[in-house]
Amino acid sequence: MKKFMGVLFSVMLGLSFFSGTAFADVDKGQKLFQKKLKKPCGMTGAKFAAKHTQDEWEEIYEEGKFKEEINKICPKVKPEAIKDSWVKHLYDFAYEYASDSGNVPSC
C-alpha cells in the first residue's frame, strides 16, 4: 500500500508540472484572437467561432486545415502569419464557442 501511494503521488506530481504547458487553453485562444485576428478579420470572436459547429471545427483541425480555414473566413489573415504554437489554442477557442456550443465569448 505504501508503494502504491508513493507511485500515485509521483504520477500526480508529474502531471501537475506537465499539464500547464502541454494542453491548449481556450482563454489563451480568445486572447490570441483578440490581439492578432480580430482587427484583420473584421469580426468578433463570437462571430468567427460561430462559422462552424463543434464537429466541423474538429474535422477541420484534424485534417490539418485550420490555418487555411482562418484564411477563408478572414482573407486578410494569411496562413503563414499564424504561428504553429497558436493553432491549438485558437482551435480550442473556436471549438468552445462554435455555433452549436451554446457558449458566448466575451470578445
Image (tube, grey):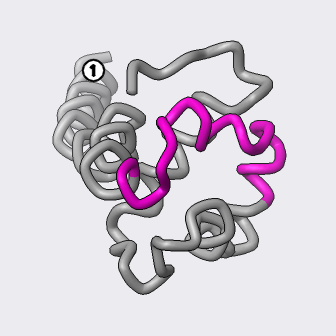
Q: Is residue 58 left or right of residue 5?
A: right
User: Residue farthest to the bottom?
Assistant: 80
Q: Is residue 15 left or right of residue 30?
A: left
Query: Which residue is denoted by mark 1 in the rendering?
Result: 5
Indicate the amino acid at tag 1: Met
Location of residue 6 with respect to 14 vertically, above or below: above
Q: Quadrant of residue 8?
A: top left
Q: Nearer the viewer, residue 33 or 76?
A: 76
Q: In which quadrant will I find the N terminus? A: top left
Residue 35 in the image: above or below residue 67: above
Q: Is residue 107 magenta-colored?
A: no
- Location of residue 49 in the rendering, given as x and y in whole percent from the top left corner: 61, 39
Residue 98 appears at what percent x and percent y?
Answer: 68, 33
Q: Looking at the figure, which quarter contains the C terminus?
A: top left
The part of the chain drawn in magenta is: 38-59
Q: Position of residue 10 (x, y in %)?
A: 21, 35
Which quarter of the picture shows residue 36? bottom left
Q: Is residue 58 left or right of residue 11?
A: right
Q: Nearer the viewer, residue 42 or 56?
A: 42
Residue positioned 72% across, 50% down in the render:
57
Q: Is residue 40 left or right of residue 98?
A: left
Residue 56 inside the magenta-drawn segment: yes
Dominant secondary structure (helix, strand or loop) of the stretch shown in magenta? helix
Residue at the spot x=38%, y=44% of the render? 29
Residue plotted at (32% across, 42% down): 34
